[in-house]
Image (cartoon, rainbow, N blue to C red):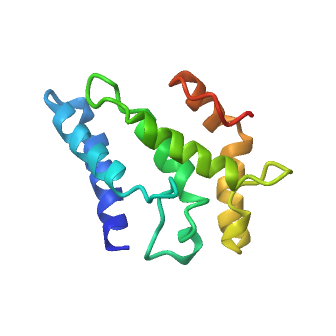
Amino acid sequence: MRGSRRSFLLAGLAAAGCAHRGAGAAVRKAAQFLWAQQAEDGAWHSHTYGLMRSGQSLTPFVLDALLDVPENVLERPVEAIDRAIAFIKRNTNAEGALGAGDGARAAAGMGTRYHSAGRMPARAAVHGRDRLAT
């Protein structure tokens, strides 16, 4: 996906600008762009990188980054967060592995490590979205 490269660049530029006064506008613009890339199924899919095409490995990372955006910079879109969490829950197997549906161990490993480390449920709980545990 041509936009995925742009997404990562925008997010990086926005993060780099956080130390400067007026960085809120850059962060807001980057976050708005990333939210606009969310698919109807709640995931962020790569159209460039095959291992991230299903969105199972990419979605937790994008959602986590977006949940770090302060609400005074951009109000969180509750419905979009709910769709992302529902996607993650639908694609987490009985053993707690996330990303196994990508058909590649590398992609499954990325999502599983992120999820099993407890980062995503903790992050979601902090932001009022403690729905991954159920």
Left or right: where does residue 31 sit relative to residue 84? left
Quadrant containing the N terminus is: bottom left
Image quadrant where one finds the C terminus: top right
- Residue 8 in percent (x, y) is at 36, 57
To which quarter of the image does residue 131 belong? top right
Q: Is residue 134 left or right of residue 17?
A: right
Q: Nearer the viewer, residue 116 or 129?
A: 129
Where residue 105 sits, quadrant-wise, is bottom right
**Position of residue 117 measured from the top left corner of the image (x, y, whole percent):** 71, 39
Q: Which residue is pictured at 44% across the width and 75% down the height? A: 47
- Position of residue 5 relative to residue 8, above or below, is below
Q: Percent position (x, y) of residue 52?
A: 55, 68
Q: Is residue 19 left or right of residue 76?
A: left
User: Which is nearer the eye, 133 or 122?
Assistant: 133
Q: Percent position (x, y) of residue 88?
A: 63, 49
Q: Is residue 30 above or below residue 7?
A: above
Count of numbered labels shown in the rendering: 0
Does residue 76 appear left or right of residue 41 in this picture?
left
Q: Residue furthest left?
A: 22
Question: Going 52% across and 39% down the picture, which residue do you hit?
Answer: 82
Q: Quadrant of residue 116?
A: top right
Q: Depth check: give the residue in front, 15 or 92.
A: 92
Image vertical order of residue 46 relative to residue 63, above or below: below
Residue occupying the point 73% across, 64% down: 100
Please name the residue shown 57% across and 68% down the image.
Answer: 54
